[in-house]
Image (spheres, coloured by chain):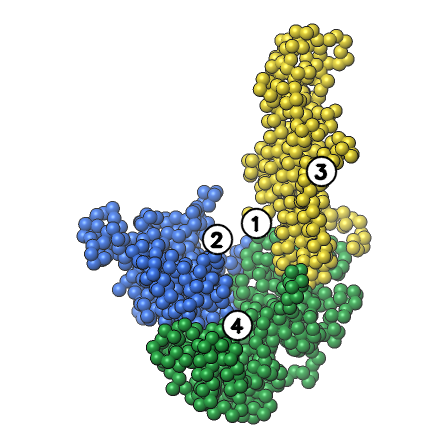
């Protein structure tokens, strides 16, 4: 069952001079229950902005330009005794609730979204190492999170739960009485995960969960996330620039570039039947530990600034396969499956399918063969600077 | 790959140590507190041959950056020697030091920090020339800077000369940093994580550039990185550092494909891979890196090691010894929780032993009882623990419950011993490389060392 | 450096090309400065004060020696008792005399006094500000660069001792020994105002010297002096501008306060002395035209220094 369904979501940041940074532009994706979904992309591609916007945590100058974020939850005041939305709420055109029980988070007020944050959607922030307050005991911080979102819980029950959570992420419950500085890096990360799980959310947003960690600890944290998912059936939205981490933990993923989703679909499809020049380029530039004689090829040029971008494909300036129409408009998402099996170029609205934003989707074989050659990337002239 | 025969090493490092005294204040001195320095680099020996790219890999805090900075004389060594081109760099005359500064350069990690925001690209790149009085005259200098900028792929150079760093992208900045290092035409360049702050799609460009320039400028690189796949891509030889010391060094492919040191093995197991389908083994190492202020005795890796060596005459399994040793470590650190054990049903001493014998490792290396209890209990009966060891552990547990931690330590000290704890392993040649591990001490070398299955065979025991 | 090697013509040519980018940069800097309205306002105010300081006679309606009813010196006659009783006189525009901001109790024109005092205030502000920067910035740089060595320790202990020095008593003793002159008062102010400067610059330097561009200069073999003054100093200049402005503003106000307490060179024209006079002669509540102008002039000068300082910080800071 679909837990999160993001529809045509565009987020902008207002800039002093009146222009706007299009941090995310017409993004579509959906996350099933119990699934790990990855948003992968380079810095500045809009992946963190996108995740923050789901729970209204954008900076002051950021705003949702258009689009919907349908999430399977009901605000307490709109729910009947089963937790489903009342029929009158669904029928009310002013309330952003759909017949299937999903609520459009983008249309909620900042007060209403607070009921969703943590209880339904929890975030493991980017610098999780600094997310713990140094002057409170770690356990107390988890207790506070529980009490804030579930005021009916007694302090004692909350404390028991905090210790239990710590134990589940592999920290001895007695350590709940320690302060953050007494924890090692890996333990801090675990504690932050425990805190995120405090109110039993349905979706966990992990923003670069392992970036600051050493590889052996990263290995353990990835294992921890997998275990949590098995145990609680929580969906995880992982945001990372690290393709190898993504390859390991995601079920599905979306590759973002310049605020747009360039390619999305099941992980295996994206890695094995790559269907977008940008993803092909990324694969070329990424070293792996197992391959002996690899030739890395970088994508020439630099990522675009997203300040009032023009209509063309965001990647066209760096793309060796760009054609006339790429300059006119950004390509829609095409169905890769259909293009591969029948050679037909068809747009798709199915968020779950393997889809790619490239006008040359009909010539996939050629793109794939050419992309492996270094000269394809180096010979093009880039109008940079 | 045995290069030592036909080539002279460019850099010879021997027994190098660097200890940082952390602000020993007046109060500490008055109170007679022993200074406890951070042992950032602790006994590194390494030869770097001309034209090679030598990789240094390790986790953060292992001392790899300090090692790099010692090599370019940003720090003075506490002990040991560095010989560059045959001369000890700690004993250079003023004149020789000038010469040294021209031949050795460094590229830093963060291109947003390594360029002075107040200096233009021209100022930055020409600075080493000015400092060393290398090219006379403004015009010649400018021509030289232009040429180097074009060499590093920043052409046409005129566009960049008067730009400030904040006008450049990350990749361009790092190219400027490379140009600054190369403008004096050095022989040896220390590269400290040169691409870790760059975006993936740009990294390869900088790495390939560095490779190309190596041929063009006849360079020798020391390439420091925490990213093992980068080390594999860039380096001919690799050294793995752990807590200030090199645990293994040798040709990169050999080290990565067939790691000999247990730490190297764990490190490579921990790297996720983009190759799908292949089930990856997780890293078999307990806990986290201890503080370099007070590193473990003997082999520094022994408290985390999966292959810790039981004493002669140990009749149980190696895994049982590893667990027993964890018990001893917990005992010493005072981590055994007597309270929790008393609350358990059954014999408290038994519960304490069960608690102390657990391993903090990924699930695939845990016993069934451990997985069921969430890592807090083992089933002592299922372990192949010798009778005397088991008795010693129970005795120790009783002593802890009786409030006598010292007696508890004494109880296990004689039974649970290992030379990994008492003797520091020397880096000994083993095949194509050097490994600092007692498992490869000469007498054992015949048994496990040379065949490829050495470590995997040992893993299968677990 | 071996610049003498090239023949003179290309040398000259290369110098122009060499300076071109710098000029270009200054132009860019100026256009960035003008983006700050507040900075431009500060500059205009300070510009007016500067003109007053350079050529007060052009702007003031009378000379500083002009006296109401009697006019410019040399004066032969004396004021009648009635005339004396009318002083301080409120603003008058031609009848019985021209004094747009009135006069003080001695018959001096307030506007003229305010304008003639600008020179003294500018002098004290700039001199004290520069002096405290010239002492504070280098000492801060050196102290920070050699952080945790005896050099740093010595400078910091000295700073601590100076902090313990009570400002007013110190100044009173200083002028008592060396005499009440403007220069001595400047010295007195600068002696205490460089301390904050030094400590802030030291802190900044401590963090800057760990930057890898400084390490990179070391690797290239740069001497300590070169690192301090070429690589670190340009990066602390923005804050030192703020301090310069603050110190200048502080000095102008401090001098006025001192004058109010009677510690001033009373032969000089100064806003502080004007304020002290109105107090000692007891007209604070009756002669607003005498009270307000020097106060406002003082405030505007301090404000203009602040405005310029903050705008300069922004202009010289490339990562805004």
Foreground pick, A217 / B119: A217
How many numbered callouts?
4
| Residue A155 visible (yes or no) | yes
Name the subunit of mark 2. A
Q: Position of residue B427 (x, y in %)?
A: 62, 82
Q: Is residue B256 visible?
A: no
Q: Which residue is mark 1?
A: C319
Residue B28 drawn above or below residue B360: above
User: Which of the image's four quarters has the C terminus of chain A?
Assistant: bottom right
- How packed mark 3 is, by other alpha carbons closer than 10 Å (few <14, some 14-19, many 20 or more), is some
Letter of the chain shown yellow in the rendering: C
Q: Residue at x 33, y 71 (%)?
A: A230
| Left or right of B246 on screen, residue B305 | left
Horizontal side, residue B361 vs residue B75: left or right: left
Q: Tell me the residue at 34%/77% (across/down).
A: B345
Chain of the residue where label 1 is placed in the rendered structure? C
Label placed on residue A305: 2
Do dots 2 and 1 share one subunit?
Answer: no
* Residue ID for mark 3: C170
């Amino acid at each position: 069952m679909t837990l999160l369904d993001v529809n045509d979501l565009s987020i902008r940041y207002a800039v002093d001079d009146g222009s706007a940074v299009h941090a995310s532009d017409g993004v579509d994706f959906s996350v099933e229950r119990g699934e790990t979904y990855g948003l992968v992309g380079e810095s500045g591609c809009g992946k963190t902005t996108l995740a923050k916007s789901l729970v209204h945590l954008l900076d002051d100058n950021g705003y949702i330009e258009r689009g919907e974020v349908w999430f399977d939850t009901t605000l307490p005041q709109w729910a009947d005794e089963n937790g489903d939305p009342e029929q009158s709420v669904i029928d009310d055109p002013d309330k952003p609730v759909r017949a299937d029980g999903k609520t459009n988070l983008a249309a909620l007020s900042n007060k209403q979204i607070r009921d969703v944050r943590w209880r339904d959607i929890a975030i493991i922030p980017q610098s999780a190492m600094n997310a713990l307050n140094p002057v409170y005991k770690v356990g107390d911080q988890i207790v506070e999170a529980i009490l804030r979102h579930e005021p009916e819980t007694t302090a004692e029950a909350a404390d028991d739960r905090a210790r239990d959570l710590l134990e589940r992420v592999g920290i001895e419950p007695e350590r709940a009485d320690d302060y953050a500085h007494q924890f090692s890096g890996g333990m801090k990360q675990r504690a932050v995960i425990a805190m995120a799980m405090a109110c039993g959310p349905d979706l966990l947003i992990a923003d670069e969960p392992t970036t600051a960690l050493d590889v052996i600890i990263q290995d353990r944290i990835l294992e921890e996330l997998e275990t949590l998912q098995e145990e609680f059936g929580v969906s995880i939205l992982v945001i990372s620039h690290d393709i190898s981490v993504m390859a390991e933990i995601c079920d599905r993923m979306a590759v973002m570039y310049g605020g747009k989703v360039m390619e999305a679909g099941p992980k295996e499809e994206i890695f094995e039947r790559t269907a977008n020049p940008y993803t092909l380029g990324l694969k070329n530039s990424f070293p792996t530990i197992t391959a002996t004689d690899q030739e890395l090829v970088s994508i020439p040029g630099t990522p675009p600034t997203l300040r009032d971008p023009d209509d063309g494909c965001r990647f066209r300036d760096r793309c060796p396969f760009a054609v006339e129409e790429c300059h006119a408009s950004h390509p829609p998402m095409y169905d890769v499956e259909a293009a591969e099996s029948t050679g037909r170029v068809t747009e798709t609205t199915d968020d779950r399918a393997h889809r790619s934003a490239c006008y040359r989707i009909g010539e996939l074989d050629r793109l794939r063969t050419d992309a492996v050659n270094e000269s394809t990337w180096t010979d093009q002239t880039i109008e940079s600077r | 790959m045995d290069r030592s025969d036909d080539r002279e090493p460019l850099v010879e490092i021997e027994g190098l140590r660097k200890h940082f005294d952390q602000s020993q204040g007046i109060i500490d001195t008055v109170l007679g507190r022993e200074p406890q320095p951070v042992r950032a680099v602790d006994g590194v020996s390494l030869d770097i041959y001309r034209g090679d790219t030598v990789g240094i890999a390790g986790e953060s805090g292992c001392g790899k950056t300090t090692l790099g900075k010692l090599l370019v004389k940003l720090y003075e060594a506490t002990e040991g020697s560095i010989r560059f081109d045959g001369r000890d760099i700690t004993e250079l005359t003023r004149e020789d030091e000038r010469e040294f500064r021209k031949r050795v350069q460094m590229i830093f990690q963060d291109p947003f920090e390594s360029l002075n925001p107040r200096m233009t690209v021209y100022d930055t790149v020409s600075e080493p020339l000015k400092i060393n009085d290398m090219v006379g005259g403004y015009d010649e200098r400018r021509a030289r800077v232009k040429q180097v900028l074009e060499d590093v792929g920043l052409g046409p150079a005129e566009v960049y000369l008067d730009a400030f760093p904040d006008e450049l992208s990350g990749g361009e900045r790092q190219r400027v940093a490379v140009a600054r290092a190369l403008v004096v035409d050095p022989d040896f360049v220390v590269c400290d994580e040169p691409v870790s702050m760059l975006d993936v799609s740009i990294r390869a460009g900088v790495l390939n550039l560095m490779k190309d320039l190596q041929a063009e400028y006849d360079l020798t690189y020391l390439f420091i990185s925490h990213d093992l796949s980068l080390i594999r891509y860039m380096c001919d030889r690799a050294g793995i550092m752990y807590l200030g010391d090199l645990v293994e060094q040798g040709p990169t492919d050999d080290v990565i494909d067939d790691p000999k040191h247990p730490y190297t093995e764990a490190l490579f197991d921990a790297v996720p891979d983009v190759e799908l389908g292949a089930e990856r083994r997780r890293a078999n190492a307990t806990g986290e890196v201890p503080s370099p202020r007070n590193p473990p005795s003997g082999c520094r890796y022994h408290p985390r090691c999966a292959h810790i060596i039981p004493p002669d005459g140990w009749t149980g399994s190696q895994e049982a010894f590893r667990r027993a040793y964890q018990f001893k470590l917990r005992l010493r650190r005072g981590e055994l929780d007597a309270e929790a054990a008393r609350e358990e049903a059954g014999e408290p001493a038994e519960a304490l032993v069960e608690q102390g014998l657990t391993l903090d490792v990924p699930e695939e290396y845990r016993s069934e009882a451990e997985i069921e209890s969430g890592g807090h209990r083992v089933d002592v009966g299922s372990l192949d623990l010798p009778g005397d060891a088991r008795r010693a552990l129970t005795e120790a547990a009783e002593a802890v419950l009786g409030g006598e931690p010292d007696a508890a330590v004494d109880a296990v000290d004689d039974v649970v011993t290992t030379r990994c704890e008492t003797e520091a392993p020397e880096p000994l040649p083993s095949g194509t490389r050097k490994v600092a591990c007692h498992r490869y001490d000469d007498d054992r070398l015949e048994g496990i060392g040379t065949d490829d299955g050495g470590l995997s065979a040992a893993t299968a025991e677990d | 450096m071996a610049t003498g090697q090239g023949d003179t013509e290309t040398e000259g040519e290369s110098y122009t090309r060499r300076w071109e980018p710098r000029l270009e940069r200054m132009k860019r800097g100026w256009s960035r400065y003008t983006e700050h309205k507040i900075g431009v306002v500060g500059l205009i105010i300070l510009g007016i004060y500067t003109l007053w300081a350079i050529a007060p006679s052009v702007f003031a309606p009378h000379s500083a020696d002009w006296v109401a009813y009697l006019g410019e010196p040399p004066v032969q006659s004396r004021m009648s008792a009635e005339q004396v009783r009318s002083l301080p006189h409120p603003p008058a525009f031609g009848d019985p005399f021209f004094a747009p901001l009135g006069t003080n109790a001695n018959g001096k024109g307030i506007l003229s006094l305010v304008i003639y005092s600008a020179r003294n205030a500018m002098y004290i502000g700039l001199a004290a500000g520069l002096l405290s920067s010239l002492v504070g910035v280098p000492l801060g740089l050196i102290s920070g660069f050699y952080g945790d060595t005896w050099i740093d320790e010595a400078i910091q202990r000295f700073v601590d001792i100076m902090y313990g020095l009570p400002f007013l008593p110190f100044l009173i003793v200083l002028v008592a020994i060396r005499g009440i002159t403007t220069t001595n008062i400047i010295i007195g102010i600068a002696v205490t105002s460089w301390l904050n400067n030094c400590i802030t610059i030291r802190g900044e330097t401590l963090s800057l010297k760990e930057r890898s561009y400084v390490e990179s200069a070391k690797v290239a073999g740069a001497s300590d002096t070169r690192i301090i003054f070429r690589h670190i100093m340009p990066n602390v200049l923005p804050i030192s501008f703020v301090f310069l402005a603050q110190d200048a503003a502080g000095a102008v106000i401090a001098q006025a306060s001192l004058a109010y307490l009677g510690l001033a060179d009373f032969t000089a024209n100064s806003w502080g002395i004007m304020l002290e006079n109105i107090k000692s002669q007891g007209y604070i509540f009756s002669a607003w035209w005498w009270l307000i102008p020097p106060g406002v002039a003082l405030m505007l000068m301090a404000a203009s220094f602040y405005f310029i300082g903050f705008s300069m910080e922004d202009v010289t800071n490339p990562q805004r």
